[in-house]
Amino acid sequence: MSPPPTPKAAPPGGGRVPTNAEAAAVFREIADLLDVLGEKFKPEAYRRAARSIESLTEDLAKVAARNELRAIPGVGDAIEEKIRELLSTGHVSYHDRLAHEVPPGLLEILRLPGLGPKTARRFWVELGVEGPAELGAAIDGGRLDGMKGFGAKKIAQIRAALAPAPAGESSARRPIDAVYPVALELLRALRARAPVDRAELAGSFRRGRETVGDLDLLVTSERPEAVFDVFSALPEIGEVRLRGGTKETVLLKGGLQVDLRVVEPEAFGAALQYFTGSKDHNVRLRSLARDLGLKVNEYGVFRGDDRVAGRTEEEVYAALGLSWIPPELREDRGEIDLARAKKVPRLVESSDLVGDLHVHLAPDATAADVDRIVADARVRHYAYVGFVVTSIGTDGMLVRASDEARARLLEANGRGLRVLEAVEVAPGLLPLSMFSEKPEYWIVRPGGAPPPEGSTWGVENARLLAHLGGDAAASDERLRAWLGAARSHGLAVEVGPGPERLDSRAAQVARSLGVPLALPTGLGAEANDPTLPVALAFARRAGATAAEVGNSTEVPPKGPKPSRPRRAG
DNA sequence: GCCGTTTTCGGCCCGACTGTTTTCAGTCG
């Protein structure tokens, strides 16, 4: 039972071991190539494996070293083999062979909106077209005219797809926090102005994914036409892409695609479930239904022609013998088995939070700024707010809150709310002797290398590892080193939107190491601020319960057991 | 190519929309 050989030889050409994202990209491209070659089911198999690899919480090489590649959903004998080849040599010969067969420009054609593998292949085989430029020339030369299935409209459509996107528009996936305000605004506008009964956001936005490719809106209404009329006229809408009896697709002015669907109330739960996804989750659900002699679609759960569920999501899951599954967990990563066993954890919610450990005060912050944040904390019945009164700026210099703001902190303390002073340090970056303060607790941010096991940070009473991002979290190795340091020092680590907080996958690593999470709460921010909802979504995607979130406990957490109770002052 | 609380072989989600069709193919989500 000798372990399989770990990749010891560096990939040729002085390369390095491919990252998970790079490996996923290779398998995606294999899928595209197979698509163009007309393969039927293999492309989806490779894509499935690519999605799984992408969502792993550790490096493929480590999984391979433990001989557990086959445990990755969608990875069987053939793909395991190819992963091993990729890890040890830096390439997959099967991929090389396919790429040799198919002109690279065909993949670009494949990725144009409205064009798929069938069409790309026809251009290649029937016209000898091998790339977007040649396709444009073929259209200009009238070579598509008279081709079966290509009328004037279709040709105009392809011509439009070939034109470069207008500046400022992009179809790329965007960070969820960047999309959050407009998503909520669209939802609010629909509820206020269109004849809808229910309206919800679905899709990867509802699942709280780090990035979203488009927005899915779902409403119930007696008058779809009227809903579409209102929606199309909203100021955010740039262009209506298509409009049918139940569905409208638009592009926002920034280029983001939004799909709006109208369903009947009896099907709302089924539609919400269906359009929330993920794809893998839905596929699993439908095959489970088939095994039970049922059929699931966006209109409900059916036994024969009888709809046995559909009005609510709970109903839909119950009809399949499952408890309701929070959207953030719907990625086919074991949640369906948990739901069958009725063991879906109760994930952390905003009502679990009782404080914020990490509110920065700018040098020009006023007493009014403090008041606004404190008032918000009182409205939310928080037990504490920790203000950072001294930290390190991007220029490496100390940043101190104004005297006015600090004076107001003292006045604001009390009446059920503890107002705390924290100082943020970066051990290894600035000597601690530069800090004269005696704060109630310290916040640590990565400066140099993570301290070795058993060392101290040089400060007593540190509670939070913040701003963990960039270089410090660039690799699985370094992320784990910092999280290991956080654990041995009893620190919570911040999760949420932005490059200086952990995303859901890194949060999952933190959880697996027993490091409590800390969520930014967006105290004092304006309406539609994404900070708290996105942070919550990331923590929930990582499977975190309230007990695993530092600022859901009564006092600022200290030590490896954040739930140990202490009296709030 | 993957997968199995019916299966180690024979399946592989399924409906809306568009454009080109006179009943459907392709794309998308």
Image (spheres, grey):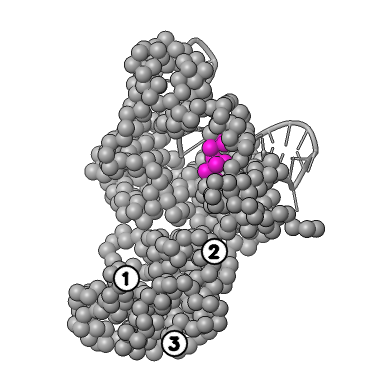
Is disc 1 placed on a helix, strand or loop? Answer: loop
Of labels 3 and 1, earlier in sequence is 3
User: Sequence order check: which comes first, mark 2 or mark 3?
Assistant: 3
User: Looking at the image, is mark 2 or mark 1 earlier in the sequence?
Assistant: 2
Q: Which amino acid does label 1 sit on?
A: Leu
How many circles with numbers are drawn on the protein? 3
Q: Quadrant of the C terminus of chain A?
A: bottom left
* Residue annotated with mark 2: A477
Can you give x and y, in whole percent of width and height, for residue A94 in the image?
A: 63, 35
Q: Name the residue under label 3.
A: A460
Q: Tell me the magenta residue range.
A: A24-31
Q: Which residue is drawn at 56% across and 78% down?
A: A453
Mark 3 belongs to which amino acid? Glu
The majority secondary structure of the magenta stretch comes to helix
Q: Where is residue A435 in the image (x, y as percent from the top left)?
A: 32, 85
Name the secondary structure under disc 3: loop
Label placed on residue A523: 1
Query: Numbered disc 2: what chain?
Result: A
Residue A185 in picture, x, y percent from top left? 30, 51
**Residue at image location 44% in from the left, 54% down from the top:** A210
